[in-house]
Image (cartoon, rainbow, N blue to C red):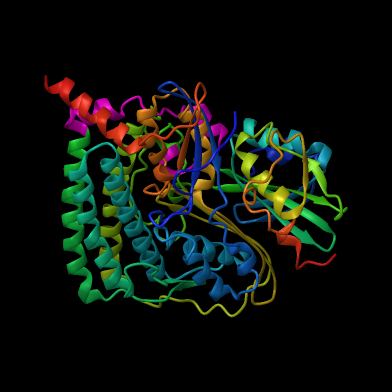
Amino acid sequence: MSVNNVPVGPFHPLLEEAEYFNLVVDGETVVDIDMDIGWMHRGHEFISEQRTFTQSIYLVERICGICSTSHPLACVHAFEDVDNIEIPERAAYIRTLVGELERIHSHLLWFGLAGHFIGYDTVWMWAWKYREPILQMFEIISGNRNHYGMMRVGGVANDVDPNRIPEMMKILDMVEEKMNMIAKIANDDPVLRSRLKGVGVLTRQDAVDFCAVGPTARASDVPCDVRRDEPNDAYGMVDFEVAVLPNGDVYDKFVVRVLETIESAKICRQCLERLQTVKGPILNNVKEITAGEGIGRYEAPRGEVFHFVKTDGSNRPIRHKVRAPSYNNIPTYVASCKGIPIADALITLASVDPCYCCTERSLKVIDVNHDPFKVDLLQLSREKTQRIRREIHE
Amino acid sequence: MDNNGFFEAMSDKVGETIEKKLRYYFVVDNENLLEVVAYIFKTMGCRLSTATATELYQGIEVLYHFSHDKSGTYYCPRIIMPDKKNPQMNSITPVVRGAEWIEREMAEMFGIDFVGHPRKEPLLTRNNLTVRKQPLRITRVS
């Protein structure tokens, strides 16, 4: 079998992120998949070794536009782990607040995209509409809607204005109400259940074998969550549940994210309440980081973000390793995509939550029986939903 | 700190150990690597977060990061290859399937030969033939 030209992508004006998949199909069934990454390799690890500790935090913030607080948070955890540096209590609540807000807006983004892929354009527009006030909360807290610049070794850069907390509580009320509505849709809509149940199953054993993380693992009955396993910042001081479901299909991944979003809103509310009473500094004065090794991690919306640093007593790391959650989750496609209909490939790939509006445009589909041909996966996916809708309503 | 019985079971296969809060870094010889990793991954139920390769003065170092999620502890086996010109070690991918990508990445970035790896081809630079070989070693003169 030969690999021929790519119709569109992985680099294209429409794409916000470059990914490339080869799907091998036999008729309507996917029989194999191969992934090709490296299109976005920007050498962050190498650049970080030329920067001071504080500069490295700003650098890793630019790794991802959606997880723009998860990487700096894991990075400062790694630097703090070298010397077991403690942070003030108020800073801990602010870090957790920002991290959980990021989870809400990332999951809402995913709900919108997933809805669009399966023909639920109303869900798409609603989810993105409800995401907007969360970005406004970021602006209230940090002054920025994205790339917040909040994290520092030993604390945070900006305090939360107590006078703005009631305003943020109202936004959380609205988001919680709307998330409950989306949860009700997931629970009640027979079309959605038929469309997503049993699709793209990742078994528990495969999730363990591939070392999957985040909602991808938790929807396959693997209960790993950094927030509970190693509760840093304020996670040991707030109440929350870790959502774990057993089936490993796209539906369970959807429900895990819905439940997580509701839990995140609860965590944010607790943090804002404590920030009204907990006073004190937001930053410990860290003068130096000694020679050693440090591991930092944070439960990003897509799973565990991992940073490792090796220091020599100077003002910069001599080695800085970064591992994002999709690096562990994307290889699970080998297990979850084989044997599924081509119409389900799009939502199965999207269920892991890579930055996906680009991915479906850079797919190459190879028919084992014929020459390479092009198909519109988005159209196939939406047509399948319409077919199920007609069958249910007739 | 409770080490979940690891050091008792692997006492003759683990070398110099650095112990920190919820972190164990320990040296393992290449011939014992697969046995130690199998114990960590299969018996203890740890998850591989990733691995880090570093060029040091004494050689090329590979440090695996296994997370024991139940206790929040990291177990990090360390392998040091003194031969910088031809670094070679056993691949753990036959035991831990999730190690395939990171070992391919370390191989292309540092020139390490992972013996027994099922797919020896570049991961990140496959489509860019102009990239220098072993790019993460270019500023570290041996």
- State which quarter of the image contains the C terminus of chain A: top left
**Could you say which quadrant of the image residue A316 lies in?**
bottom right
From the viewer's side, name the closer residue of A267 and B85.
B85
Q: Is residue A57 visible?
A: yes
| Residue A212 part of the magenta-drawn span | yes
Q: Residue at x 67, y 72 (%)?
A: A290
Q: Residue at x 28, y 71 (%)?
A: A139
Q: Position of residue A385 (x, y in %)?
A: 24, 30
Our reading of the magenta stretch's main secondary structure is helix
Q: Position of residue A149 (x, y in %)?
A: 42, 72
Left or right of residue A302, residue B82 in this image: right
- State which quarter of the image contains the N terminus of chain A: top right
**Part of the protein shown in magenta:** A187-216
Left or right of residue B29, residue A141 in this image: left
Q: Residue at x 46, y 30 (%)?
A: A336
Q: Position of residue A285 (x, y in %)?
A: 52, 80
Residue occupying the far front of the picture: A371
Q: Is residue A66 above or below residue A205?
A: below
| Residue A231 part of the magenta-drawn span | no
**Could you say which quadrant of the image residue A342 lies in?**
top left
Q: Is residue A263 visible?
A: no
